[in-house]
Image (cartoon, coloured by chain):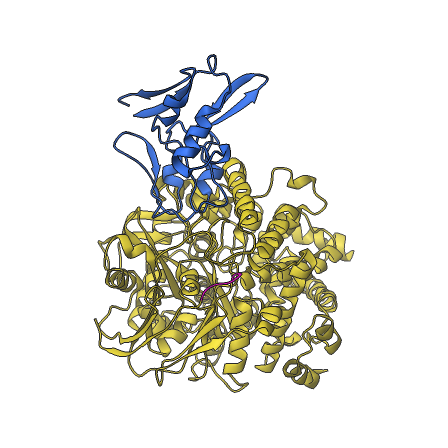
Chain colours: A yellow, B blue
Amino acid sequence: MGKILKQIKYTPAKIHRGYSNKSLYINVGDLRVEEKEVTEFMKEKFVGGKGFDLWYLWHAVTPETRWDSPENEIVMSVGPLGGITQYSGTGKTLVCAISPLTGIPIDSNTGGYFGPLLKFSGWDALELQGKAEKDLIIFIDGNEGLISIEEGEEYPEDSHLLAEELTAHFAGSEEDKVHVSVVSSGSAAKHILMGMLNFSFYDPRRKTVRFKQAARGGLGTIMRDKHIKALVVKYKGIKPNLNDPADLAAINRIGVKYHKEVHDLDEKQNTMRKIGTANTILVMNKYDLLPTRNFQTGGDPEAVKISPEVFINQYLTQGIHDGCWYGCTMSCAKAADHFKLLTGPYAGLCVTVDGPEYECAAGLGANLGIFDPQAILEQNFYCDTYGIDLISYATTVAFIMECYEREQIGPEHTGGLDLRFGNAQASLELMHQMSRGEGFGLLAGLGVRRLKSIFVERFGADPKLLEDIGMENKGLEYSEYLHKESLAQQGGFALTNKGPQHDEAWLIFMDMVNNQIPSFEDKAYALYYYPMFRTWFGLCGLCKLPWNDIVPADNYKTDTPAKVPEHVQNYVDIFNAVTGKHIDKDELIRQSERVYNFQRVFNIRMGSGLRQHDRPPYRSLGPATAEEYLSRQERYDKQLRELQGLDPSRMTLDEKLAATRAYREKQFELLTDAVYERRGWTKNGVPTPEHLKEIGMDLPMLLEVVEKHL
Amino acid sequence: MKILTHKQEICTGCRACELACSQAYFRTDNRLKSSIRINNNFNTFHAIMCTQCGECINMCTANAIYRDKNGVVRIDKKKCVGCLGCVGFCSELSMFYSDDEPVPFKCIACGICVKACPEGALEILVSKS
C-alpha cells in the first residue's frame, strides 16, 4: 500500500427518503475534505444525480475554465432512487465535468456499484477538484466512516489489473469483494482526450472484477490529469430499505410485477438476458441503420458474421445473472469469459470481456468495416482496460480510415499504419499506441474535431470533405446509429446538450423500425418529450433500458405505445414511494425540464449552446459523397421525384447530390425551429426568460446569461 | 434430494400446514407468511410450494441462492439484498415475500407441515437425483 497522506473519520449520514442530505468535497490539490449540506432548494430544483452534478459544477467553474483547469470538477451522484434493489436498473451513477472534447459540461451515466455504495456511505454526491502532483487513491469506507487519501504511484495503470488489486486489498477477503467498487481509467487516458472511467462491480460467480463505463466526453482524461488513479468505496450491508423509503410495500409490489414481466416476455421481445443491447445488430442492418465504414451506409452483407447468435453461441456465457447493480433482472451486462487475447501487452492472457454492447459491435465492428467477432471483443477489452471511450474511438478511427482510403492522409502521416477499413490489426496497434502514448495513436486520441483541423492544416486534406464526413457535433463523436433517413434522430443527436449521444433522444428505432412518429409534428414533439423524459433517469439514478426494452404484453393497446405508459407510471409511483412526494407524469417531465434548461444555459455560459453549435455534419443528414448516393440511388431518386417534384433522369449526379442536400438541410432547419419553439427557446436556441419562469427556473444566475443573447 | 409433496385427493383444505409453517418460521398465524399455500379451486385443494427446481439459483442478482447438501434450494439471508427477482421469476409462484421481511422465503422441505397435517396429505420425498 502507498503512504497515507490524509485520513479523516466521519459519521455517515442516515438516508431519509432517498437522500443522505450530505455531499462530499475533496480537493486533491491541497487535500481539503469538506462536508456540504444538500439543501431543499437543490432537491426541489435539481432532484439529484445529474442535476446535483451540474449544480455543483456551475459553482466550481467560470466561463474561462478549461478541462484541465484545476477548478474543473468531476462530480458524481446516484440520485434519490439509486440503490433500491427491487426494480431493474436502479444503480446508475451520473458523472459530470467540463469535457476535454467539447469544452462544455459532459454528463455520462454508468452502472457498477460505486454510486449506490457511495450514497449508503452517507454521500449524495462527490465533488473532486484540484490537481495532485502525484497519483492518488481515494478510499471511502462507509461502514467505518473513514476517508483516506493515499499515494497511488505503485499501482498498475490498466483497469483490469488496478481494480482487481484494489478490490482485493480493500475487501480483505473473497467474501467482502462484492462490497467494494473501484472507479479507474487506464494507461491511454493520460495521452488522449477521450479517456473514460470504469466503474467496477465484483462478480462472485466468475470471481472477477467487472466494469461498466462513464465513457463519454473524456472523464477519464480529466481524472488522470488530476492524478487520481482510483476511487474506492466499501460498504457492506445492502438491503431493500436502505433508502428509508416512504412506502416500501409499493416498491416491492411494482418490483415484483416488473420482474415477472421480464421473466415472461424477454424471450419473446428483445432477449436482453441472452445478448444484452447487441440484440439489435441485425435489426439495424436490416433497416439500413447499422453504421458502416464511417456512417457511409447502413449495413453490409457481412454483418451476419457479427450477429447476436455468433456472440451467444461462441462467446457469451449464458444462463447466469449479468446485472451491473442488484435487482436488475434485465441482466444485460453480458460477458465473454476465458477470452484469449492475441495482441498487445496482455497477449496470451485469458480474460473476461465485458460486452459486447451494441455500440461496441456496431462501432468497433461495422463502422470500421471489421466483421470479425474476435477482433471486436479484443478491441472491446483493450478500450476498457486502457480507459478509452470506445464510441469516440470507433467514430474517430472510422473517420481516419475514410480519410486514408480517400487519400486525404497516407501512411506517411500514420507512421506506416495501413488504416484501411477492415484492418483490425491496425486498429489494435493504434489502441496500443494510445496506451504507450506514442505514434499516430496520440493524434487519433484527440478526436474528430481536432483531427479535421490537423488533417487540413498539416496534411493538406480537403476541408469541405472533412467537415462533411467528420462525425462530430459540439466536439463529441456521434454514437453508432446510421440516421440519415431519420429526421427525428438527426435532431436527437444534434439538438442535444452534451453532444450526439443517443441516451438523450434515442428515437431511431421508434422512427425507422416501429414507425411510431411518422409526421413532422410527431418528430418535433418527440424531440421535446423524450429528451425530457430520458433526462429524468439521470436525475434519479436509473437506467433507461428497463423502460422500453421490455414492455407490458398489452402495451400496443395503449394510446401512446412508444411512451410505454405503464412503465412511466411505475417510475412515478416508485419516485413517490421512495421520496414521499406526490409527483405525476407531468411533474416528472417538469423536473427534467428544469435541469435540461439549466444545462443549456450552462452551455451558453461556457460559449456554446446556440443554434450554430447544434448544426450537424452533412453526413448526419444525407449522402455526403457520390458513392453514398449511388449505393442507395433508387431511394434518393425516388425522394427527388416525390418530395421535390424533380426528374432525376434529367439530372447529373452532382445536381442530384446538391438538390438532395439543399432539401435535407432545409428540413433540418425547419425541425430545429419547431423543436426550439416547443422547448421554449428562441430561434437561436436560447431558453427565454418567460419559459424559465414557467418551469420555475428564473434564477438570477440563469437570467444573467440568457439576457445577453436575446 | 428432499421435496415436499402434496396429495390433492386427500387434502381437506384445513390449512393447518400454512399455520404450522408461518408459526415455525415467523411466530405468527398468518398464511401470507407460510411457504406452503393451499388454494381452493372449486373444493379441490392445490398446494403451491417449492419444487426445488433451482431455476432461481443462477438468476439471483446477489448470488444468494444455493442448493444445500440435501438438494434443497436455500436462501442465504446474509447475502440476499431483497430484490425479489426470484419472486417474479419463480415459474411455480412459490417464492414468497412479505413487506415486513427483508428477504423472500420458500419451502425448505423441513417437514413441519407434514407433521401438522391431520390427513397425511403431505410427505417429504427423498430421492438421489
x and y, in percent, of residue A705 in the image: 65, 83
x and y, in percent, of residue A153 in the image: 24, 75
Nearest the viewer among A643 and A479 is A479
Nearest the viewer among B70 and B17 is B17
Residue B107 against residue A353 in the figure, above or below: above
Q: In the figure, is residue A266 to the left or right of A143?
A: right
Q: What is the count of numbered marks?
A: 0
- Which quadrant is the N terminus of chain A positioned in? bottom left
Q: Which residues are magenta?
A: A14-18
Nearest the viewer among A218 and A637 is A218
Majority secondary structure in the magenta region: loop
x and y, in percent, of residue A239 in the image: 42, 52
Nearest the viewer among A505 and A373 is A505
Q: In the figure, is residue A565 to the left or right of B26?
A: right
Q: Is residue A319 visible?
A: no
**Residue A367 among those drawn in magenta:** no
Q: Is residue A230 visible?
A: yes
**Residue at 28 percent of width and 80 percent of height:** A134
Quadrant of residue A141 within the rendered picture: bottom left
Q: In the figure, is residue A551 to the left or right of A426?
A: right
Among all residues in the image, which is located at the extreme right?
A: A645
**Residue at 34 percent of width and 48 percent of height:** B78
Quadrant of residue A231 within the rendered picture: bottom left
